[in-house]
Image: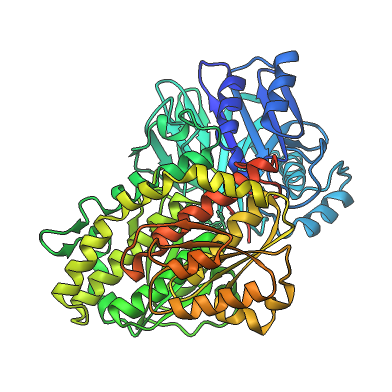
Amino acid sequence: MCGIVGYIGHREASDVIIKGLKRLEYRGYDSAGIAISNGELQISKGKGKVAILEASLLATPIKGTLGIGHTRWATHGEPNDVNAHPHTGNTRKFAIVHNGIIENYDVLKKELQKNGCTFIGETDTEVLAHLIEEVQRVSKADFETSVQIALKQVVGTYGLAIVNHDEPDKLIIARKGSPLLLGIGDGETFVASDASPIIEYTNKVVYLDDDEMAVITRNGYEVKTIRNVKITKEIHELEMSIEQIEKGGYPHFMLKEINEQVDTISDCMRGRLQVKANDIKLGGIEPVLDKLVNARRILIAACGTSWHSGLVGEYLFEYLAKMPVEVEYASEFRYREPLIDDKDVLIVLSQSGETADTLAALREAKERGATVIGICNVVGSTIARETDAGVYIHAGPEIGVASTKAFTAQVTVLTMMAMKLGKMRGVLSEEKFHELAVALSEIPGKVKEILQQAEKVEEIAKMFTYAPNFLYLGRSYNFPVALEGALKLKEISYIHAEGYPAAEMKHGPIALIDEHMPVVVLAVTNHVNEKMISNIEEVRARKGRILSVTNERNTDVIRLSEFAITIPETHDCLTPLLTVIPLQLLSYYIAVNRKCHVDQPRNLAKSVTVE
Ligand code: F6R
């Protein structure tokens, strides 16, 4: 949550920062601000999106070649002008932007107030600004030592950038729990929460690790721990391109990303799914394959959409590899006493690779001796770096806050892993493996066919734009897809929606059904089809409005539905890769009709780096 950009070099810092903050807006967009150090420390900030800050800088420019900026997702203190970052202390000597949570802010604040500090807002970050100032006042230490002393008193998480009125050619950044990286240019250095603001200037980056800080000047940078131990960091080359982070003619990133799935699923399988050789190669997990094959059980931990793909994974591993699986909300896993040890394998799923709860689950499992495998999208992300082994999903940057292409790529990786394990464990025959490998290789073409029906989904969306509630029903592999469909709708259109295993409907939710209730049913021709048809009848008997995602030969379902979207047939265990596509489109068009901000829904942020 929250996006940070910093710059020191020869360009106008405010141009680099505003452009960068726009790219980071998916991390938070309730207020934005900038501080430029040019002999003076000049700050402009306020409630609202980066465009508002940009307009105010156009009216009143702040010139200078060193600065920091922030786009906020509020944790402490409502989104308003005062709580917007950057924050300063009483003397306005330091300006600071921060992503994370200072857990002991209240204790620190009371202490600082006793020493005469006056607070104007409610954020935990303002405490940090005062603390650094106070440390320097008392200790007379230099800029970086003051930052180090202050940070040693902090409990919590931070990715932060600080400028100092008295040292206008220096920028300090530090990290604990919230991502930060440096972009190394020619005579210029960039700082950002992720690579998207940097990629148009340089592809050379340095990832900061926890408890590290960087002191950046016009002559370069130096990385050290907050305990002042110098560190030589590896410079990584980014593979991302600028086209990948632009809308490419689509009105929204979400629609672009839905349409990209034909390619992203292919990219995810490329070089891995070897149909002719009847094999799957997942290089990233080869070092731990033995451990995985012989694991007592697999645990999967994730949040949100990634948790839904984890649920699909449970069905896949049990069916294809005959391995026991438990899927956990990462946030819950951490706060109980999980029974996990070195005989278990934990798979963490995360698009961003930065989700705080997922990261905490990973660390908890590692501490207890389990092998941890990551399935991430963002290359070089914290989760990707901290796991014992992993598989990148290769979906390319996902910028729309509602996750779409990451879900299908995650499910594709889980399918390949389950097939590989099934084969290695001798529970998936060569013939069955081949049949599935062929079916999997055909999925991108089938996704394309579904996307060609977008106009039909758009028409259907018009019928349901103002429905106050939605119910999504599925069974077996498509139960997690029902959950995912409901999540997509509620997060971007603000319509209340629930996903349910179809059979559970009669244990409660059926009471909600009347002639106003749209019920989306995922009913494909499989072993639970007859049961789904009975559930559809139950909804119809109560006048619920049936919208089905089904197959063309499922004529009974089509006959019983008010609207039916048909998808091509595939092997039952691969259907989530297809059934989810119309649900993504449906939520997209409903949100557009309701004039919702599709790519930046209210109250949400893409990368949830607080617990
Ligand atoms: C929903 C969505 C969120 C994320 C969740 C986990 O569309 O995007 O529910 O899936 O915040 O994020 P990652 O996968 O980055 O760990």
Q: Is residue 38 left or right of residue 390?
A: right
Query: Which of 318 and 502 lies nearest the eye of the viewer?
Result: 502
Residue depicted at 43% across the width and 72% down the height? 477
Identify the residue at horizontal 66%, vertical 46% (top origin): 601
User: Considering the image in quadrants, where does the C terminus appear?
Assistant: bottom right
Above or below: residue 392 compared with residue 501: above
Residue that sits furthest to the left in the current view: 277
Residue 163: quadrant of the picture = top right
Does the image show residue 126?
Answer: yes
| Residue 472 place in picture, x, y as percent | 59, 66
How many numbered discs? Answer: 0
Residue nearer the viewer, 602 or 116: 602
Nearer to me, 195 or 602: 602
253 and 99: which one is in front? 253
Residue at image point 59% right, 49% down: 460
Does residue 607 appear to the left or right of 155 in the view shown? left
Q: Where's residue 334, x and y in %?
A: 56, 73
- Occupied quadrant, residue 431: bottom left
What is the quadrant of residue 119 in the picture?
top right
Query: What is the x, y in percent for residue 409?
Result: 38, 55
**What residue is rendered at 70% in x and 15% in y?**
58
Q: Is residue 359 visible?
A: no
Report the coloring of the rendering.
Answer: rainbow
| Spot occupied by residue 602 in the image (x, y as percentages of width and height) | 70, 47
Whether residue 550 sits left or right of residue 484 in the image: it is: left
The image quadrant where one finds ligand 1 is bottom right
